[in-house]
Amino acid sequence: MGHHSCCNKQKVKRGLWSPEEDEKLINYVTTYGHGCWSSVPRLAGLQRCGKSCRLRWINYLRPDLKRGSFSPQEAALIVELHSILGNRWAQIAKHLPGRTDNEVKNFWNSSIKKRLASLVDVPALASLVDVHNSKPSEEAADFVSLNVNPNAFILSDQRDQLYLSPSASSVLQSFSHDTDFKPNPSNENVDLIHHHFPITPMFPTLSNPASFDPSWPLIPFVTPKHHVPNSSNEVVQDDKLVNPTAGLNPYEYGPFMATQTVPKLCEILQGNLCNMPLTSISLENIDPLISKLSSCFPISAGSSYSHDMHVAPKQMDFIDAIITSMPLSSSSSLSALSSGQYITNPTLPSSSWDP
DNA sequence: AACAACGTCAACCGCGACATC
DNA sequence: CGATGTCGCGGTTGACGTTGT
C-alpha cells in the first residue's frame, strides 16, 4: 500500500506541523482556496502531501473552528447522536458547529467513553448478552469496546418509575461535576437529554395495568437477568420478567405482559422503524426526535443496532433540522437531575457518576 | 527528583466511494 | 469497463503533557 499516491512523487515531510508550514498553508488556502488538495503543497511551497495539508486545514487551521473543551451540552448531544448514528463521527460533527470529526472522535474515546464505562454494570451487561439471542458474541464485543449504542444501557429494575437514558443523562451529570462547568440557575445550560427524554409516562407499570399501551408488545424488550421481582405478581422465568396474570385476561391486562420490561431506545427505534404500529400515545412519549425521524423515514427490517442502520442523506437532513429547531432551554434543570429526581436506576450509585 | 502510568490529541494509515479518463 | 486519481472517513498511533508513586 504505502503512502497515498500524491505522496509518492516527492519526498514529503511528516509529523507535526511547524508554525511556518501553518502560515504557508493558511496564506495559500485563504488566498486561492484549496482547489485540488494534491496540488496544494506544490503551489503553497510545502514539503507535505496533499492529504496531510487537507487534514491540517480541516482539523486545525480552518478559521471557523471552535477551540477549547466541549460543553456539557455538546457532550450530551454527542451521546445522543452517537446513539443514533454510531461511530459516524463526521455525521455527528456536522451537528456541532466548529467541531471536527477528529475532535468528536477523540473526545468520545478519551472522555465520554470512560464516563459511560464507569456507569456500566457488568452483571447487567453479561445478562444482556445472555438474554439477547441475536449475535451475542458481537454484542459482547460491542459492550466491551463501548462502540455500542449507549442506549443499550437502558436497563430498568423497577417497574413504577420512569427512567432517562442513564448513559446520556449521567454523562451530562458527570460533566456537571467538572470544575469548568457550573450549572446556570437561569437554565442557560441546556439539558438536551431531558429535552429528548421528557419525564412523562412512557413505560407501562405492573401496578397499573391500565397504563399499558397495546403497542408495547410489538417492541422487543429485554430484562436484566439479575432483576429482582418487586411485585408479588412478578416472577422471572427464562430470563424474562413474567407476570403470572398474563394471558389470563388479555382484555384486562393485554397480551404483552409476559415480557414487559423497559425497551432500549434503539429497540424502540428499530421496532418503530420497522413499521410496527405504535400508537400515537406511545410516540408522543418518546423522544420527539426519534418519533419524528422514525415516522418519516422508515427503514428496512433486519438492522439490529444503530450502527447497522443505513442513515440516508435525507434522514441526516431531518436530524439536522430537528436539532437546530430544538429550544435552547427547557423547563427541566440540572438541579432536578442532580437531586436524583429522574435517575433512579439502583444499579448505578450516584457516586459512580463522579468523574 | 526521577520515573512510570495515564490522558489527550494531532497526525497518519488504509480503505472505500466517486469521478474522470 | 477497467485504471487511475482524488477525497473523505474511521481506526490507530505516537508524541507530549500531566499526574501519581
Image (cartoon, coloured by chain):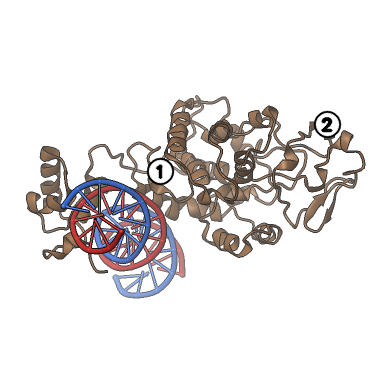
Chain colours: A brown, B blue, C red
- Image quarter of residue A246: top right
Badge 2 amino acid: Ala
Secondary structure, mark 1, is helix
Chain of the residue on which disc 1 is drawn: A
Q: Nearer the viewer, residue A178 or A201?
A: A201
| Residue type of the residue flagged with mark 1 | Gln
Q: Position of residue A89 (x, y in %)?
A: 40, 48
Provide the chain ID for the residue under circle 2. A
- Residue placed most toward the observer, A271 or A323: A271
Q: Is residue A303 left or right of residue A16?
A: right
* Label number found at residue A271: none
Q: Position of residue A96 (x, y in %)?
A: 39, 38
Q: Residue furthest right?
A: A248
- The secondary element bearing badge 2 is classed as helix
Q: What residue is shown with label 2? A: A210
Left or right relative to A322: residue A59: left
A184 left or right of A260 in image: left
Residue B6 screen position, x and y as percent = 44, 63
Instruction: Report if residue A96 is visible in the image.
Output: yes
Tell me the crowding category of disc 1: few under 14, some 14 to 19, or many 20 or more residues within 10 angstroms, Cα based. some
The image quarter in which residue A47 lies? bottom left
Disc nearer the start of the sequence (1/2): 1
Residue at 62 percent across and 31 percent down: it is A198
Q: Give how far apart the Cα atoms at labels 1 and 2 are.
A: 41 Å
Residue at 89% over, 45% down? A233
Q: Which residue is mark 1?
A: A91
